[in-house]
Amino acid sequence: MQEIPMSDTVEMLQAILGAIDEGIHVVDANGMTIFYNHVIAKLDGLTPEEVLGKPLLHVFPSLDKDTSTLLQVIEKGHPIYNKRQTYKNLRGVRVETINTTLPVQVGEKLVGAIEIAKDIGKLRELSERLIELQAQIGKSKRVKQAPSDRLFFQFDDILTESASMHVLKTRAKRAARTSSPILIYGETGTGKELLVQSIHQASERSDRPFIAQNCAALPASLLESILFGTTKGSFTGADDRAGLFELANGGTLFLDEINSMPLDLQAKLLRVLEDGQIRRIGSSQSVQVDVRVIAATNEEPQKVVKAGNLRADLYYRINVVSFELPPLRERKEDITLLVSHFISKFNRKFSMQVNGAAPDVQRLFHVYEWPGNVRELEHVIEAAMNMVEGDTLQLEHLPAHMMSRVELAEVYTAAGITTADGWAAVEQRHTAASTLPLTIRPLREAIRETEEALINLALEQTNGNILQAAKLLVIPRQTLQYKLSQQERTEPN
Ligand SMILES: Nc1ncnc2c1ncn2[C@@H]1O[C@H](COP(=O)(O)OP(=O)(O)OP(=O)(O)O)[C@@H](O)[C@H]1O
Ligand SMILES: [Mg+2]
């Protein structure tokens, strides 16, 4: 093996670190800067030349060996993770970063430290702007609105013909009368937000704010200040700001993807749920708030607790009232209704006059697994409405990834195989036969080839044993024999 010269490796590393869009600052064991990229230079209001090759404390006189994270890491040899820093740089610009500082070791020997700084100033500004907008929406919606320009969903918007969903709606309407916390579980696109908004709308809180926050959308330290607010002059250097709990006072706070909330913050949330008191970061005073908290997760709550991403004590508190939204594949009776609902919606939106979907399309929709649930169905209809000619949605108007399933569905149906064991099984077989190109071609030809390939595969796996191959394909032996004789007839000799 050819060795890469050391100087090339160093240059390569420098190029990589230079191209990263996070601030990187590396010092040697004596606290002398040996690498300083443009991102961190911009944050600090300096140029790399002003910093490189100089002792850190000379360039940053406001720091000392106890306040500099880089020097602390060199002294103690331990990493410091996700430390929030707020400071005015040398040009007087306020900078907010989240830093991770790690010791650099060669073998056993500590040779320096590296600091990685993520600029969160922009993110914070945007989050705060979002809070202001949410608060404004909360206020403006106290004025009655016409259903067509309603900002929030109501129970009537949850369309369903499924018995389990009807039960869920009835239970949710009852729960709308109280202020107990609620936990909602449902896969992505099953209508969690729809349900949460409906509960708020049906409650006595409907003329008070509804505020939603996705816990996965923000870094931990920012999420905390967004939820609880900040006090001027506190260690974060932040302004006086109300958090979402205060802004949602009297109303509903929807905490989506609760399992992404850091565990220490979950403990804080639990305390708020217990005594209704919040304290802004940096403040010693508590404020009483009256907020109904609805939390949601798209992973099974008990699994999330087991995996350690949701504190058990918080889980028991928010699970007092809980709802599980079934995935669309488990309530196929809703598909026809939702298809016509979305067709009407896009007819209105695009000024079109589509009447409906062809029977083939409906059939495919009923065998398809819908991993993205109702949202995916909505998007598929929107995509088809962009492709349709005439007044009926046809198979060819559907997205390509569904067409490959059509071919397979046809094959399996033709072979007498039901998809009762789900698309996972179908796809597994499909992967096994993945020599098949999945481009759009004449359907009949594609079906015949797919069928032949699957039969050959089954025969290969069973060393030509027709009975076993038929079992693998889940078709009667006679059917397989018939198909083989048909194949022979069409085979060129
Ligand atoms: N039963 C339903 N009737 C009508 N529309 C629905 C229904 N369920 C979901 N939708 C629509 O599907 C889309 C997705 O719903 P929603 O945003 O509530 O899902 P979600 O569970 O919050 O998804 P995610 O986990 O990805 O955030 C929305 O446009 C919503 O209006
Ligand atoms: Mg959602």
Image: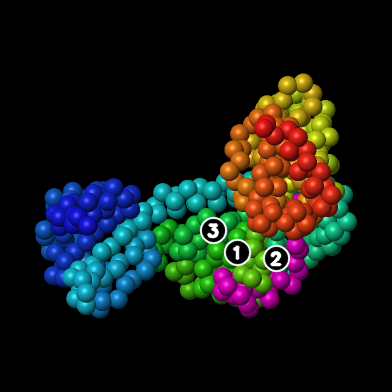
- Mark 2 lies on a secondary structure that is strand
For badge 2, the amino acid type reads Leu
Determine if the C-beta at disc 1 is less than 8 A from ligand 1.
no
Q: What element carries label 3?
A: loop
The percent coordinates of residue 456 (x first, y second) are: 67, 47
Mark 1 Cα-neighbour bin, 10 Å: few <14, some 14–19, many ≥20: many
Query: What amino acid is found at the position of numbered circle 3 in the picture?
Result: Ala
Mark 2 vs ligand 1: CB below 8 Å: no
Q: What stretch is highlighted in magenta?
A: 305-329
Question: Quadrant location of the C terminus?
Answer: top right
Q: Are marks 1 and 3 in contact (CB under 8 Å)?
A: no
State the separation of the CA atoms marked 2 and 3. Answer: 16 Å
Q: Sequence order check: which comes first, mark 2 or mark 1? A: 2
Q: Position of residue 239 (x, y in %)?
A: 43, 58
Q: Is residue 144 visible?
A: no
Circle 3: is it few (<14), some (14-19), or many (20+) Cα within 10 Å?
Answer: some
Q: In this view, does 76 lie above or below 433?
A: below
Indicate yes or no whether the magenta region holds residue 312: yes
- The residue that label 3 is drawn on is 216
The spot of residue 343 in percent (x, y) is 77, 33
Q: Relative to residue 22, is residue 364 depicted above or below?
A: above
Q: Which residue is identified by label 2?
A: 183
Q: Which of 203 and 111 is in front in this view?
A: 111
Disc ID at residue 258: 1
